[in-house]
Amino acid sequence: MISVQSPILVGGVQVATTAERGWTPEELAQRAADKIVFVGDQSHPAVQAQARAFKEQVKQVVLFYLKEAVQQDRATIANRLVQAGHADLRSILED
């Protein structure tokens, strides 16, 4: 009889929610940067510092494009509202 024992490795699961709102671009950018760049606890402190600086740059780039996407989507929706004869609803899309 052959038997094989192997440990079951389960990755950590993280759950994050918001209350009565959607995610902000800042929150999404942070989540994206956390997934893109990993900073190891066992790394040399200089490497950790460099990785954290890079992670912050990634976050800022992602944030910029998320904000651009929101603006472009709002512009599209605003134009469609006007085309559909609901120009008065356009104001609800303003910040």
Image: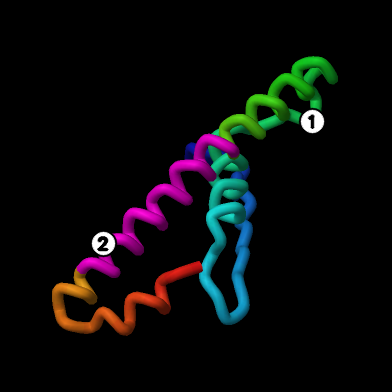
| Foreground pick, 90 / 64 | 90
Going by the numbered disc 2, the residue's amino acid type is Thr
Residue 13 screen position, x and y as percent = 61, 56
Is the magenta region chiefly helix, strand or loop?
helix
Location of residue 23 by image quarter = bottom right
In the image, taking residue 71 as reference, residue 19 lies left or right, namely right
Q: Residue at x 47, y 50 (%)?
A: 67
* Mark 2 or 1, closer to the camera: 2
| Foreground pick, 20 / 17 | 20
Q: Residue at x 58, y 37 (%)?
A: 60
- Write down the residue under mark 2: 76
On screen, 42 above or below 90? above
Q: Which residues are magenta?
A: 60-79
| Foreground pick, 59 / 93 | 93
| Foreground pick, 54 / 13 | 54
Q: Which mark is residue 41?
A: 1
In the image, taking residue 83 as reference, residue 86 lies left or right, namely right
On screen, 20 above or below 65? below
Is any part of residue 85 visible from this angle? yes
Q: Residue at x 60, y 69 (%)?
A: 17
Q: Crowding at label 2, few (<14), some or many (≥20) Cα neighbours within 10 Å?
A: few
On screen, 43 above or below 57? above
Q: Secondary structure at mark 1?
A: loop
In the image, taking residue 66 as reference, residue 8 lies left or right, namely right
Q: Residue at x 52, y 70 (%)?
A: 22
Q: Which mark is residue 70?
A: none
Location of residue 46 by image quarter = top right
